[in-house]
Image (cartoon, grey):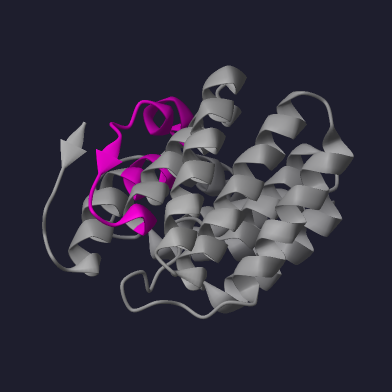
Amino acid sequence: MTRTDSPLLANHTAVAVVPARYALERGDWAGAAALPVVTTPRPMADSLVRFARGLGMARSGDLAGARREIQALRELHAALDKANQPYWAERTDEQILAVSAWVAYAGGAREQALKEMRAAADGEDGSVKHVAMENRLYPMRELLAELLLQSGQPAAALREFESASKENPNRYRGLYGAARAAEAAGDRAKAAEYFEKLVALSSKADTVRPELAQAKAFLGRR
């Protein structure tokens, strides 16, 4: 368990978000699930890691663990309510909905999963970014798009990926997801467009990512 006593909220969120973002952006769900719990004087920072852990558990098959993280998020939500922090309480609401959605999906309740994930996306889209967290840890609408794609709805997924990109442009996973959705929907021209953007974004990468290899393979078959 990591404890930090920095007085600045931005410092607390940085401690929480950097390892969480590294795992989530790589789609390393097991790694996200294994993140150490962060305990700070700021529950809005702690919730970021609980969200990442819960999402990682839900997407790597540990549904019992994900439900424990949902409970931890509810406790942090109560602390935020008690501290009169409605903005951060609403963000925690969205985190609870998102993890719950992926738990529901893993359990076969797809309609419930999509309903909860859409509610999280709509909630986040209706909020303003906070100076302590100017970049979303993982855009909720992008998570909705991924859920739609996994549910066999690539055209709907593509629309959501494109909607997410308006607020969060040039995201590696967003471009990759849009390309996959377009390919699955049979729109090879649009898939090529997004794969090209992914390759351009990664032009100075110093490691080989499987998403980039897939993009180059697709473009090589045109």
Residue drawn where x is 75% and y is 57% of the image: 118
Position above or below: 153 against 132: above
Where does residue 94 sit, x and y in percent of width and height?
60, 56
Position above or below: 30 against 52: above
Q: Is residue 180 left or right of residue 65?
A: right
Q: Is residue 31 left or right of residue 105?
A: left
Residue drawn where x is 35% and y is 44% of the image: 20
Where does residue 185 sit, x and y in percent of width and height?
84, 51
Image quarter in which the N terminus is found: top left
- Viewer-proximal residue, 159 or 204? 159
Would residue 34 be counted in the magenta stretch? yes
Residue drawn where x is 54% and y is 35% of the image: 71
| Residue 90 visible from this viewpoint | yes
Total marks in image? 0
| Residue 221 visible from this viewpoint | no
Would residue 59 be counted in the magenta stretch? no
Q: Is residue 182 left or right of residue 75?
A: right
Region of the chain picked out in magenta, as a range: 20-44
- Viewer-proximal residue, 110 or 163? 110
Q: Is residue 200 left or right of residue 67?
A: left
Outermost residue to the front: 82
Q: Quadrant of residue 104?
A: top right
Where does residue 57 sit, x and y in percent of width and height?
52, 27
Where does residue 88 sit, x and y in percent of width and height?
46, 65
Residue drawn where x is 37% and y is 39% of the image: 23
Position above or below: 66 against 126: above
- Viewer-proximal residue, 177 or 143? 143
- Viewer-proximal residue, 111 or 44? 44
